[in-house]
Amino acid sequence: GAVVSQHPSRVICKSGTSVKIECRSLDFQATTMFWYRQFPKKSLMLMATSNEGSKATYEQGVEKDKFLINHASLTLSTLTVTSAHPEDSSFYICSARGTGHSPLHFGNGTRLTVT
Amino acid sequence: EDKVVQSPLSLVVHEGDTVTLNCSYEVTNFRSLLWYKQEKKAPTFLFMLTSSGIEKKSGRLSSILDKKELFSILNITATQTGDSAIYLCADNGSGNTGKLIFGQGTTLQVKP
């Protein structure tokens, strides 16, 4: 089945620094990947759609200059949280879809803590 | 605006009980509905429902879709403590965006 790998699983950084999170589709090519954010005991909130070879599409209210997305290949998308602040602390999850009309498969998520 | 609504938002039961989780949706160009289980990490896929009235089953879990009434249910029989999780329902990418629209989730706690 489709496997999505996300790295790192946990990161702690200081306020003002930038953090990069990687999302890889291991056994399939993904022209589109999705980045979600999840607050404790809440559902997943879509942040942006990452498109291979083109600009990401951001959801309303998500700052594109703060959450930089790069989808340079068919198997890799990265999310960079720039100039992180404590309010950026959250659980970030990436996902990708295989071919056709298939379910979305998720990475294991990255827990970001900004001190 | 497309939306997915789950109920109840939280549920506490005892081992052995049967639970029914609800998901209603209002989406344009509906294709399918997804159920996921989320424990401590990322959601794991349970079911994809495309056709009305056909029950999907996996062990003690089953799910069915009603496209006329625009809802789905997820049943868990003989619950175990390991069933404790957030259960998420999602519209599987209506329109051309391919993105999922999630419901709020149902937090299930199964007590010994």
Image (tube, coloured by chain):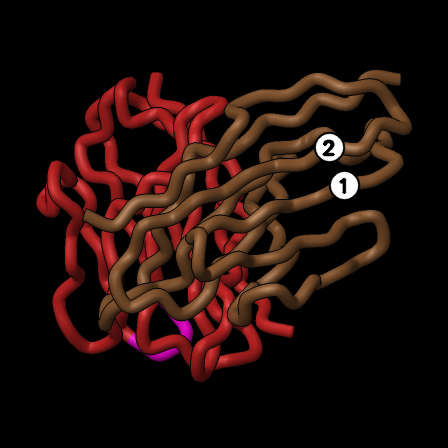
Chain colours: A red, B brown
Q: Amino acid at mark 1?
A: Ile
Counting residues from the N terminus, which is met first, the one under dot 2 or under dot 1? 2
The disc label shown at residue B84, or none: none
Q: Residue at x 56, y 58 (%)?
A: B65
* Residue interval drawn in magenta: A73-77
Residues flagged by tags 2 and 1 on a common chain: yes
Q: Is residue B74 magenta?
A: no
Left or right position of B51 against B11: left
Whether residue A70 is visible here, answered yes or no, is yes
Is residue B37 or residue A22 the one in the foreground? B37
Q: How many marks?
A: 2
Q: Residue at x 58, y 67 (%)?
A: A3
- Magenta part, dominant SS: strand
Left or right position of B49 against B3: right
Chain for mark 1?
A: B
Q: Quadrant of residue B27?
A: bottom left
Whether residue A91 is visible here, answered yes or no, is no
Is residue B75 or residue A68 the one in the foreground? B75
Element class at badge 1: strand
Q: Position of residue A45 (x, y in %)?
A: 33, 40
Q: Is residue A74 magenta?
A: yes
Element class at badge 2: strand
Q: Residue at x 40, y 45 (%)?
A: B102
Residue under label 2: B19
**Quadrant for the C terminus of chain A in the image:** top left
CA separation, marks 2 and 1? 5 Å
Residue under label 1: B76
Is residue A100 or residue A83 the one in the foreground? A100
How packed mark 2 is, by other alpha carbons closer than 10 Å (few <14, some 14-19, many 20 or more), is some
How packed mark 1 is, by other alpha carbons closer than 10 Å (few <14, some 14-19, many 20 or more), is many
B101, above or below A89, in the image: below
A22, above or below B15, in the image: below
